[in-house]
Amino acid sequence: MRKIRKTHSKYGKYRFSRKQFILSALLISFFGVGAWVIHEVLYPQATDEWFESTAVNTHAVSLPKDDAPHQAAMEWWYYNGHLNTESGKQYSFHYTVFLVNNVVHHMVSHASVNEHQTGKHYTAQRRTAGNPSIKKENGFEFTQGDWLMIGGNGNDKLKIITDEFSLDLSLTNTYPPIYHGGNGIISMWDAGDSYYYSRSRMAASGVIKIGDTSEKVTGISWFDHQWGDFSVGVLKWDWFSLQLNDGMDVMIYQLRDKKTDEPILYTGSISQNGNTETLSAADFMVVPGKKWTSNKSSIVYPMEWVIEIPSRNIYLEVKSISENSEFDAMLTTYNIYWEGAVKVQGSHTGLGFMELYYMDNKR
């Protein structure tokens, strides 16, 4: 058993100013949860405050038990994927549910679809007061109106309906889960610790709808589940999930201090044939290349990377499929990040996803 560190900010385990805390308490006491929602709209928290997470757990990850929600202040279930239609069109998507347990519960969902033929990028987000999940043993079920994320033990269902795009997918795990850090725990040092596992190859099938056109799709999806004792708001990061054509799956996670840019944690995993190898900072090199500047946020993101893992003779050239993949989540999680599909060439070929978070505290 490994004891997970417990960290506290100035006013206990949730980071609020004294004024915010008193106002929030009064609103909830006299007017109920609805007033809390109004308060969050009028006085939104900074990204580092919203993401503040402290949870105490003492066991390594155990599946399918840990597919279910935990008593953590922050927890998320995340999917990305590549989809192909019978007519030859290609799409990529991501869908994340954040479950937040601070003064009151609320849930946030982010979803996006990228149309590779046209470069069009569709995004949607929702935030719901309370905890609209259904309690399940060995699984999860989240519903926000006509959005659905349900799963457990590698048999999952996703449904997203918007005016611009819709997805209805069934996913089935085809590989053993990856327990990052060996037992599903990774240390982020001063930022805290995290429980973290992935299902790196889920077969996906279903229907995609763009505008008024619906088509059947098949493809491959990557699933992440992360929770625990960490404060994401003090970090910026580069994250890669790569599904290589020889059956190897690679996850690279680079965390840096948001203010100083100093490395906090460089870690990764290689998984093949049911065997997983944990990577430390000394095992790999990640070098950014060509950059793209967002017209909306002015944030600069590297769109091309070289990833080397010398001990495995791996040399990968990772390139974004569509530069226009920034997600503006200021309405729900008060941040902006880049989330999109990549293609892989070099010693191995394949597909994957990349998430970049470089937003500073000035926005």
Image (cartoon, grey):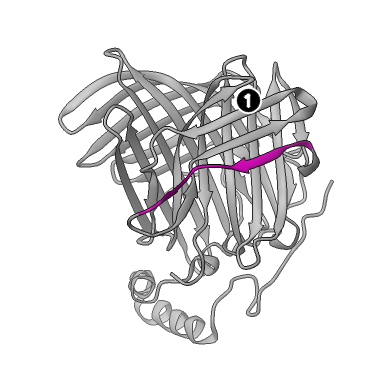
- Residue at left offset 70%, top offset 16%: 273
Q: Amino acid at mark 1?
A: Asp
Camera-side residue: 294 or 195? 294
Would residue 153 be seen by someone viewing this image from the given angle? Answer: no
Camera-side residue: 290 or 166? 290
Give the image location of residue 37, x and y in percent. Answer: 36, 69
Give the image location of residue 90, x and y in percent. Answer: 34, 23
Is 184 contained in the magenta span?
no
**Residue stretch rendered in magenta on the structure:** 283-294
Q: Quadrant of residue 161?
A: top left
Query: Residue under circle 1?
Result: 249
Q: Quadrant of residue 306?
A: top right
Would residue 280 be seen by someone viewing this image from the given angle? Answer: yes
Q: How many marks?
A: 1
274 w.r.t. 325: above or below: above
- Residue at left offset 33%, top offset 55%: 295
- Residue at left offset 61%, top offset 59%: 235
Please tell me whether mark 1 sits on a helix, a strand or a loop.
Answer: strand
Give the image location of residue 95, x and y in percent. Answer: 42, 40
